[in-house]
């Protein structure tokens, strides 16, 4: 009898595991939206609060469509920095740029400059998706990293998510380069939610949660604009709220 119970228990665990695998989808293989949401000239400005205090701004841009290594790419940038008041307590600034292919939104090149109080770092990454290699340079130290095809960086992944058909109740997985190491990130679409925003008024959103602790709300339309982002950081909860949407042609 005990043997039968053990076998039944093992079968239940196997079934539960199998169901969890079946309900997790590859984001790389998920269909794109019919209308591409990435528009050259788009500028999104966010106000940032940390531990409930006004802390600074973040501005993301789709700068241009250009060519890198013979491939058509979008040039994306992001700048975050603390404001004058909060900056007196905690100075932070980072500048990021990413070049992503226009067809699949895979990053080819990523650059980041970081100022975190007295700490400084400069990172450059060049991706070769065909060979599965990324050349990772941090403060002049170079190393080759094996990466899965379609791996994203911290900026490109936002636009990659925006391009996909996402369904409430589904979980997706995709690879991201985090601190020089490839990681498999899970993304759960856990509900629809109506938010009141300064930039867009009342909008229906898709609420997303990632396995590394980020929460994000994307407009549930063909624009897929991120209107709110939350994350836990060492000095408190960070909340980014969309303040303004601009388009420059």
Image: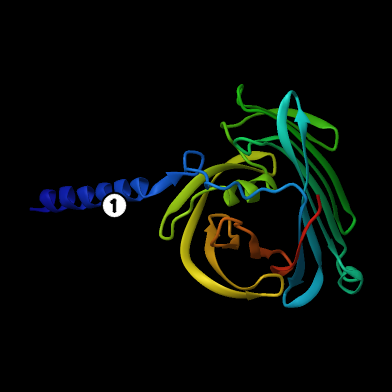
Question: Considering the numbered disc 1 on the image, is that residue within a helix, a strand or a loop?
Answer: helix
Q: Quadrant of residue 44?
A: bottom right
Compared with 221, 76 (above or below) is above
Q: Nearer the viewer, residue 13 or 223?
A: 223
Horizontal side of 131 relative to 207 (left or right) equals right
Q: Please, which colouring scheme is shown?
A: rainbow
For the point 53% across and 60% down, the residue is 209
Horizontal side of 197 relative to 210 (left or right) equals right
Asked if one can make out residue 230 in the rendered structure from this viewpoint, the answer is no
For the point 12% across and 48% down, the residue is 3
Residue 35: image x %, image y %? Answer: 57, 48
Compared with 182, 128 (above or below) is above
Q: Nearer the viewer, residue 45 or 36?
A: 36
Horizontal side of 206 relative to 79 (left or right) equals left
Asked if one can make out residue 227 in the rendered structure from this viewpoint, the answer is yes
For the point 50% across and 44% down, the residue is 27
Q: Quadrant of residue 128?
A: top right
Residue 119: image x %, image y %? Answer: 87, 52
Compared with 48, 188 (above or below) is above
Q: How many marks?
A: 1
Horizontal side of 203 relative to 66 (left or right) equals left
- How would you rate the neighbour count of disc 1 (Cα within 10 Å): few for under 14, some for 14-19, many for 20 or more? few
Disc 1 marks which residue? Answer: 16
Q: Nearer the viewer, residue 233 or 240?
A: 240
Residue 153: image x %, image y %? Answer: 67, 43
Residue at the farthest front position: 249
Residue 171: image x %, image y %? Answer: 44, 53
For the point 88% across and 68% down, the residue is 83
Q: Nearer the viewer, residue 90 or 190?
A: 190
Compared with 206, 50 (above or below) is below
């Amino acid at each position: 009898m005990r043997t039968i119970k053990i076998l039944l228990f093992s079968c239940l665990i196997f079934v539960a595991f199998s169901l969890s695998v079946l309900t997790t989808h590859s984001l790389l293989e998920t269909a794109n939206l019919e209308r591409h949401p990435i528009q050259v000239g788009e500028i999104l400005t966010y106000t940032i609060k940390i531990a409930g205090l006004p802390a600074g701004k973040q501005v993301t841009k789709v700068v241009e469509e250009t060519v890198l290594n013979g491939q058509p790419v979008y040039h994306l940038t992001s700048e975050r920095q603390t404001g004058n008041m909060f900056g007196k307590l905690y100075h932070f600034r980072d500048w990021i740029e990413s070049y992503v292919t226009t067809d699949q939104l895979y990053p080819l090149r990523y650059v980041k400059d970081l100022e975190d109080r007295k700490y400084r770092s400069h990172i450059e990454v060049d991706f070769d998706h065909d060979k599965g290699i990324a050349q990772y340079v941090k403060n002049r130290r170079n190393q080759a990293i094996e990466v899965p095809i379609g791996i994203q960086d911290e900026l490109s992944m936002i636009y990659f998510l925006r391009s996909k058909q996402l369904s409430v109740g589904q979980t997706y997985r995709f690879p991201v380069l985090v601190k020089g190491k490839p990681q498999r990130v899970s993304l759960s679409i856990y509900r629809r939610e109506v938010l009141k925003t300064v930039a867009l008024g009342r909008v229906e959103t898709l609420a997303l949660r990632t396995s590394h602790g980020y929460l994000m709300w994307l407009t549930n339309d063909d624009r897929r604009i991120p209107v709110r982002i939350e994350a836990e950081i060492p000095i408190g909860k960070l909340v980014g709220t969309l303040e303004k949407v601009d388009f420059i042609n």
